[in-house]
Image (cartoon, rainbow, N blue to C red):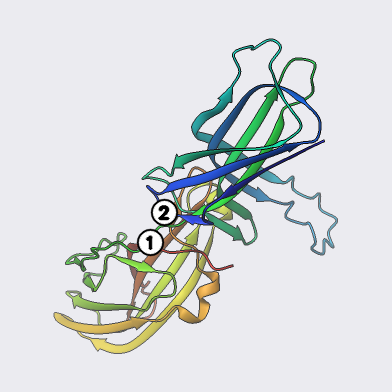
Amino acid sequence: MSLFRLTVDKSEYAPGDVVNFVCWLNNKDPLQAIKLVADLSMSERFHIAGAAQGLANPDNLAEPPPVQFFNSTIIQSIPLWRTQNKKLGTEFTAQPRSFRAQFVVPIDAVPSVVLTDFFKAQIKYVIKVELFLAAGRGKALPAEIAFNVVRSMPLINPPLVMPGLPKDFTSFDVEASLGLEQSMYSIGQDIQLQIQISNADKRGIKGIKVTLEEVRNGHFLAEHGRTNILASESIDCMIGTQQSKSFKVLLHPGNVTKFIAPSTFSGCVQVEHFIRIYIIPNKIFTSGIMFSVPIEIVGAQRL
């Protein structure tokens, strides 16, 4: 019988941080060991149960099969110990021992998230250590521990000014510009913005709506993606033809903080944030116009 465990010095790390970890081995019986190897990996998981699971199914429809994707990538690997006798191994007598080492979180590491919507998705980082035994002496002894990668606010966070916002094709001739006090925001932080709307169309504008929206999995299996409105402000205003007006808007997502995940992007797990401006024309049968600006939200997810 052997007790094999791992500890790390923190529960959260930023990209570029050093992860100090200790591997503790307390074997009650002698072991013939070959090598001790540590891996740092990033895993991503996406899972959707059958759509009818847990729901009433009056038409007796066949339940769609579950959708599941899992991927784990080893980022770094280091040998903690290795014997010179690869065939017979080296005897680990029955006593406690420890091994200390370090990993470095990649500077481009994407933040950890846990999503529990209609689908379940997760990005997590794991240190796994395995003690490999000589042939015929039993299976390798594994131990692992997970930790979160969290991006923090940068020391320099300049304003973001966009004099012309991109928009989808529309016959309504309107332009918008946006100014933000910061380029990056933390989870739950108020967002103060300055908007200017210029109407060059023959039709008037009767209002605008500004939202902060979180889009989950808008790319990987986008048909299963979800959009959450984290904050919203509506403004009733009349902007006639050849007129421009400026507005100050405060978006306050604090009361829905628990629903916000940090911005992150991997192969099968994505969380994106957008400030969206909806222009409401003063004419029936005329579709609204949307301007969309991506922003980055950082910090630890609050579950």
**Observer-nearest of 225 and 152:** 152
Residue at 51% across, 30% down: 77
> Residue 12 at x, y = what percent?
50, 57
**Element marked by disc 2:** loop
Q: How would you rate the neighbour count of disc 2 (Cα within 10 Å): few for under 14, some for 14-19, many for 20 or more?
A: many
Q: Are marks 1 and 2 in contact (CB under 8 Å)?
A: yes
Q: Residue furthest left?
A: 242
Residue at 61% across, 28% down: 36
Q: Is residue 20 visible?
A: yes
Report whether 216 appears left or right of 249: right
- Height in image: 179 above or below 86? below
> Residue 242 at x, y = what percent?
14, 79
- Height in image: 18 above or below 228? above
Q: How would you rate the neighbour count of disc 1 (Cα within 10 Å): few for under 14, some for 14-19, many for 20 or more?
A: some
Residue of label 2: 14
Q: Which mark is residue 116?
A: none
Q: Quadrant of residue 272?
A: bottom left
Dot placed on the residue nearer the N-terminal end, 1 or 2:
2
Report whether 241 appears left or right of 134: left
Looking at the rendered structure, the kind of residue marked 2 is Ala
Residue of label 1: 152
**Observer-nearest of 277 and 237:** 277
Q: CA distance from mark 1 to mark 2?
A: 7 Å
- Height in image: 3 above or below 209? above
Looking at the rendered structure, the kind of residue marked 1 is Ser
Quadrant of the image for the N terminus? Answer: top right
Q: Quadrant of residue 162?
A: bottom left
**Element marked by disc 1:** loop
